[in-house]
Amino acid sequence: MKSSSSSSGVLRKGRLSTYLYTLLAFIVLVAIIHGEYFVCSFRRLEPPRTSRVTSPTPVLVGLGLVKKREDYKLPFAVGEGEEGCDIFSGRWVRDELTRPPYEESECPYIQPQLTCQEHGRPDTEYQKWRWQPHGCDLPSFNATLMLESLRGKRMMFVGDSLNRGQYVSIICLLHRLIPQHRKSMETYNNDALTVFRAKDYNATIEFYWAPFLLESNSDNAVVHRISDRIVRKGSINKHGKHWKGVDILVFNTYLWWVTGQDMKILKGSFEDEEKEIMQLSTEDAYRMAMKSMLKWVTRNMNRTKTRVFFTSMSPTHSKGDWGGEPGGNCYNQTTLIEDPNYWGTNSRKSIMKVIGEEFGKSKFPITFLNITQLSSYRKDAHTSIYKKQWNPLTSEQLANPASYADCTHWCLPGLQDTWNELLFAKLFYPNSS
Ligand SMILES: *[C@@H]1O[C@H](CO)[C@@H](O)[C@H](O)[C@H]1NC(C)=O
Ligand SMILES: *[C@@H]1O[C@H](CO)[C@@H](O)[C@H](O)[C@H]1NC(C)=O
Ligand SMILES: *[C@@H]1O[C@H](CO)[C@@H](O)[C@H](O)[C@H]1NC(C)=O
Ligand SMILES: *[C@@H]1O[C@H](CO)[C@@H](O)[C@H](O)[C@H]1NC(C)=O
Ligand SMILES: *[C@@H]1O[C@H](CO)[C@@H](O)[C@H](O)[C@H]1NC(C)=O
């Protein structure tokens, strides 16, 4: 990434006209009067960087106050992202030189639900794509830098099975640097917590199962396929107490909220005999969870030392809505969707709007990994039928493989390695776009 860019956004360029200054002064005043936290727009979630202060221009951040940029260096940053480059906007390019970043067979941590080659996938084309942002290049993933930065620290992924896939991917990207007997992976609390240890670094990379982030009746990490899902309002501390003291948190939650019906929200506790349950639309229920998460982060994370990421919705390809065969899904798909405007049906857009609105109000700078659209082009990258099957398949299923294809999860190596390259870019080279 270019290191000469000193700032991003008009506010920081010191070129504002008097008119704009007046307008800004007014906005600050309004913000102070209302005692509200002021964030210019979602794209400026991350506070401006500190390293290259070229002018004494004060910038508008937090609390409606005008503060100097120096106060807001993001932890872990070693440089800046290229000014104005949205790394989530780009295209996939074939790259047989650098892809895949590791072989499936050399990473023993991949769970059998994601080892597609081992389960007979005939092609490896899905492993050979690299994400190329339109406006700049991604920094290459530097495992040494990542491990050194994690020395004495904890990194934790919190969420559902999609986040577990991203978790395993980052371990696969890092573990080669660590000799066999200096690393380990263990599970705790009935598998709710998985801990990878890099002993010489005194570092852990952990995964915590909480598909709704809040307490729910699907919290058992092994037996959780519950169709009548119930989420308990205001219960984030139930899981959150296990996240305290973590230095880098990576959240996700989405798929479990999308049931095609209203969500059932429990007001009391799961132990109550008479349960008080209200029904909320997916969007309202999701908003409730985002508010709880942001409140928890603001109360429990220290912005001068820790970072919080949120990975956006992972798309599924279970209907041929990309112009493929009607009723077709990801089964037997080996090519990418080429329409750059492809987004897919279902609730992704309305949930994206909720995220934008709630994160825009956040008092803690959350780094958003906006992987939804770039992943939606990748109908080729799902595990499909090439994964461990927990139950024996019936003859009907075997006769029609598309009927049991998994079009939710992703083969490793594969798409999720790119999510971690984007995480790497935002961790070490953040900017405000
Ligand atoms: C990776 O990071 C390490 C530690 O910061 C640094 O010494 C090394 O030069 C980097 N490697 C590359 C290829 O940039
Ligand atoms: C190891 O890291 C933990 C934080 O994860 C820290 O509390 C502890 O002091 C570290 N121990 C050593 C010996 O550095
Ligand atoms: C956050 O960490 C900094 C640096 O260690 C420390 O000075 C500050 O007191 C901490 N803030 C809170 C609220 O714990
Ligand atoms: C898979 O797709 C190819 C075309 O891309 C087609 O020729 C073939 O019949 C399909 N195979 C199955 C089993 O559907
Ligand atoms: C994420 O990216 C998509 C385009 O890829 C955009 O439409 C959407 O607004 C972005 N979401 C947020 C919250 O910035």
Image (cartoon, rainbow, N blue to C red):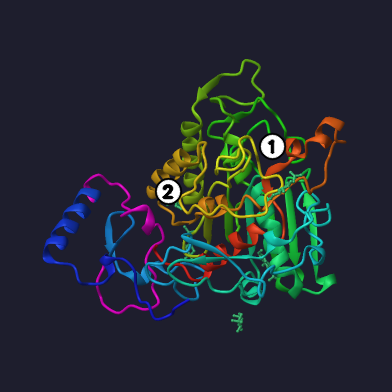
Name the mark on residue 359: 2
Question: For this rendering, which residue is in front, 247 or 42?
Answer: 42
Judged from the image, the secondary structure of the residue bearing numbered disc 2 is helix
Name the mark on residue 219: 1
Which residue is at a point 72% across and 33% down the rendered structure image?
Answer: 225
Which residue is at a point 28% across and 46% down the rendered structure image?
Answer: 35
> How packed is label 1: few (under 14 Cα within 10 Å), some, or many (20 or more)?
many
Q: Earlier in the sequence, mark 2 or mark 1?
A: 1
- Res. 229 image quadrant: top right
Label 2 with label 1: CB-CB less than 8 Å = no
Q: Determine if the C-beta at disc 2 is less than 8 A from ligand 5.
A: yes
Q: Report x, y in % for residue 200.
A: 75, 74
Would residue 43 be counted in the magenta stretch? yes
> How packed is label 2: few (under 14 Cα within 10 Å), some, or many (20 or more)?
many
Range of magenta residues? 32-58
Residue 359, compared with residue 176, is above or below; it is above
Disc 2 residue type (three-letter): Phe
Is residue 249 something that shows in the picture? yes
Q: Report x, y in % for residue 224.
A: 73, 35
Real-space Cα separation, disc 2 to disc 1, in angstroms:
25 Å
Question: For this rendering, which residue is in front, 115 or 182?
Answer: 115
Q: Report x, y in % for residue 27.
A: 20, 53
- Res. 358 image quadrant: top left
Q: Quadrant of the C terminus?
A: bottom left
